[in-house]
Amino acid sequence: MSLIATPESMTFSAALPLQSGASIRDYSLSYETYGQLNADKSNAVLVCHALNASHHVAGVYAGQDKSEGWWDNMIGPGKPVDTDRFFVIGVNNLGSCFGSTGPMHINPDTGLVYGADFPVVTVEDWVTAQARLMDALGIAQLAAVMGGSLGGMQALSWTLQYPERVKHAVVVASAPNLNAENIAFNEVARRAIVTDPDFHAGHFYQHGVIPKRGLRIARMIGHITYLSDDVMNTKFGRQLRDAVTSNDTGYKYTTQDVEFQIESYLRHQGDKFSDYFDANTYLLITRALDYFDPARAFGGDLSAALARATCPFLLISFSTDWRFSPARSRELVKALLDNHRDVSYAEIDAPHGHDAFLLEDARYLGVVRSYFDNMAQRLNQEAA
Amino acid sequence: MSLIATPESMTFSAALPLQSGASIRDYSLSYETYGQLNADKSNAVLVCHALNASHHVAGVYAGQDKSEGWWDNMIGPGKPVDTDRFFVIGVNNLGSCFGSTGPMHINPDTGLVYGADFPVVTVEDWVTAQARLMDALGIAQLAAVMGGSLGGMQALSWTLQYPERVKHAVVVASAPNLNAENIAFNEVARRAIVTDPDFHAGHFYQHGVIPKRGLRIARMIGHITYLSDDVMNTKFGRQLRDAVTSNDTGYKYTTQDVEFQIESYLRHQGDKFSDYFDANTYLLITRALDYFDPARAFGGDLSAALARATCPFLLISFSTDWRFSPARSRELVKALLDNHRDVSYAEIDAPHGHDAFLLEDARYLGVVRSYFDNMAQRLNQEAA
C-alpha cells in the first residue's frame, strides 16, 4: 500500500535572523510527515532536500498516481528509512518555489512580490528555520538528520549548529564545500538566467514573463554535471535522433536542429524545468551551495570546524560522481576521524554519477537500511 | 629575433563539394607561412587549428608586439617545430571568423551575407580545402600535418583522406570522435547562442546586433571544460574577489554580483570572446566537432577506419584533460597498432587540463622537438 502524503504548512511570525545580517519575518514553511512520532519523541528523522526538490519526500498525493516523493525509494513503510518505525519529516526550504515562502511571494515590508529582493539564504539559515519547525513540532532531538548533495550539507550543518539535537547524521553524495569548478558551473547557469532579457533584474513577475531561456540553459548545464560520462555514453552515446537515409553518415547536417539523442534529451529536460522552476530560486539555491563552507571560519581547517559535531555519521559517495566526488566525502571522513567521531563510510561503485543518490541501487539502499535498522534497535533498547 | 608573420589569402573560384551534399564557391582561405620551402618541397608542415584559433600560428605581426600566434611556443626559429628547417603553413578554416570565407561574408549565389545559410562544414571538408591550398602552393606531400584538439582531428583526417600526401601526423589532445558529454556541452553552448533574442535565427548582421549574451555563456561553458579541476582549484579555489570586512565570512551575500574570483575570471573570458567571435562560426565549428567520427562508416570499428592511414604517428595526451582524455588518445593508439602502424605516444602528466596543449610544458615540447628533429635528420639523409 502506498503512503499517502499530505502537505502541511506552518507560519512563523517572528523574524528569522539570517547569516547575511538581513532577516525575514511572517514566512511559512511547507512540510510533510510520514509515520508516527513515538511517545518519547525519539524517532524523528528530518530529510533535507537538494536544489530541485521539496518537502514532498515520500508517498503519493491522494488521487495522483504519479506523484511519488523525490526519495520515495528510500523512505516509506518497509523501506530503508522505515516509516513504520520512524517519524520522517520533509521540509521545503526558504526561498524555494514549492510552497515555502520564496521570491514569488509578497514581502510584508513592501507589499510587493519579493523577486530579486528575497534575502540571500544560506545552508545555515535553512537549518535554523528547520530547527524552529522542529521546536513547533515538539521535537527536541532528531534520531537522524539526512540528505543528499545540498541536503547533505544541511545535515552536516545541523551537527555543527545544533550538535545536541542530532543523534545521527546521514550525509550522501555531499561535500564540505564547493570547489572552483562547481562554483563555475553554478555561475554560468546564473549568468544564463540573469542575462535573459525576460529576467528583468529579478522582477519578471510584474512583467508577466518568465526567463525560460535562461532556466533552460541552467538546467541543461546542471543535468550534464549530474550524470557520469559513462552513463551518458551508455544511454545516449553518439546515437542520432532521426538518422537520414540519403547519405552514408545519417547526419542531417544542421547547426540548429537536434541531431543527436543527447541533445533531444537535454532540450527536453530544460523545457520541463523552465515550466515549473523559479528563476530567483535558482539563483538563491545555487548561491547557498557556493557559500556553504564550515571550514571557512577556521582558516580552512575542516577538522577544527567539525570538532563541534558529536554524533555518529554515515557518509556515502558514488564512484562516478564528479560533481561531489568520493574524494570530497573522504575529506569529511578524515576530519571526523581526526575528532575521534564514530563514522561509517560507504563508497558505492555506481555508474550514474551524482544522480545515483536518488536512484535505485541495492548496495546503496542496503547500507542505509542497515544503518537505520541498527538505529531502530537502539531506540527500542533505550525505550525498554 | 621574433618571426614576423604576414597573412596571405588565396581565392578559389571552383566549387568545393561538401560532405553535406552542398558546395561552396568563390571562397578565400587566409593563411600564413613561416620558414622556407626547400628545393624538393619536402619540408612542409601544415598546422590545423582548433575552435578559437586561426592561420596566425606563429610569430608576431610587424609593429604589433603582443600579437603572438596561438602556437608560438611550439613553432618558430629554433623551436620544437623549427622554422629554420621546416616550412610551416597555418590556414584558417572555412566558416571561421578570422579571414577565410565565413558566415559574415557575402553568399555569391544571393548577394546577401551568409549568416545561418553558410553551409555546414566538416573536418573532412576543411581537409579537402586545405589540400586544394597545398595544390596551389605546389606541395604534393607534407612532411607532417599536425594539430591539437579539433586540429588533431584534421591531422588524423588528412591521413585517411590523403594518405599518400602525409609523411607524418602529429595529433595532440584529440579524440577519434566526441562522446555524449562533449556533444552535450557543445549543445548547451549552441542553445545559449540560438535562443539569444539577438541571434535572429542567425541573420543578426542585418539587424545590427550581436548575440553577445549567448556567446558569453558559450565561452564560459567552454572555458570550464578546457581547464582541469586541479588547476581551477589552484588558480582560483574559493577565493573571493572583494572580501568584505563587515562579517566573519567575507561574503557580500549576493546572487547577481561577482563573489568568487572564478566568477570574475569566467565573466571576463566570456566578455572578451563575445567581442570578437562570430556566433554562426561557433555553431559551425562545434558541429564539425560533433560530426567527426571516422569509424562511423565502419560500423564503429576504429581499427577498420584507420586502416587507410599509412604514415607514422605521434600522439600526445595530457593526464588532466577531461575533455579529450588520455583514454581517447589510447583508442587511436590501439587502432593504429591494430594496423601495424608506426606510433609514438606520450601521455604527459600536466595539471592544466585540455588547455595544456597550448601551454609551455618542457616534457611536452621536448617530445615534439625530438620527433621533428628525427624527421629533419631523415629529410637531410633523403636529400643527401
Image: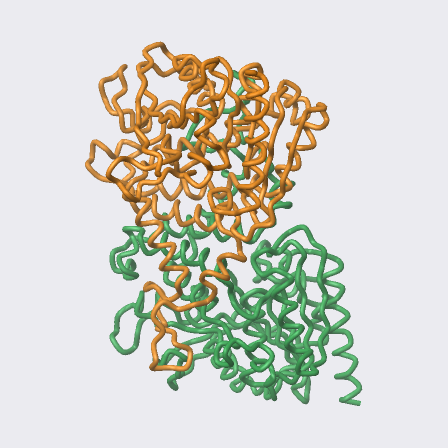
Chain colours: A orange, B green
Q: Is residue A199 left or right of residue A70?
A: left
Q: Residue at x 27, y 78 (%)?
A: B109
How many numbered marks does the figure carry?
0
> Residue at (28%, 61%) from the top-left corner?
B203
Q: Is residue B327 left or right of residue A89?
A: right
Place residue A5 in its image quadrant. top left
Indicate the position of residue A32 as horizontal and vertical percent values: 36, 27
With respect to residue B340, does B346 lie above or below?
above
Q: Residue at x 39, y 46 (%)?
A: A219
Q: Nearer the viewer, residue B42 or B19?
A: B19
Residue reaching furthest to the front: A384
Q: Quadrant of residue B318?
A: bottom right
Between B383 and A107, the one nearer to me in the picture: A107
Position of B208 relative to A308 (above/below): below
In x, y percent, where is residue B249? 55, 22
x and y percentages locating residue A167 in the rendered image: 57, 20
| Closer-to-camera residue (A344/B383) | A344
Instruction: Answer left or right for A209 relative to A184.
Output: left
Image height of A255 relative to A133, above or below: below
Q: Give A349 or B227, whichever is nearer the viewer.
A: A349
| Rendering quarter of residue A345 | top right
Where is residue A290? Give x, y as percent.
Answer: 50, 33
Q: Quadrant of the N terminus of chain A?
A: top left
Which quadrant is the C terminus of chain A positioned in?
Answer: top right
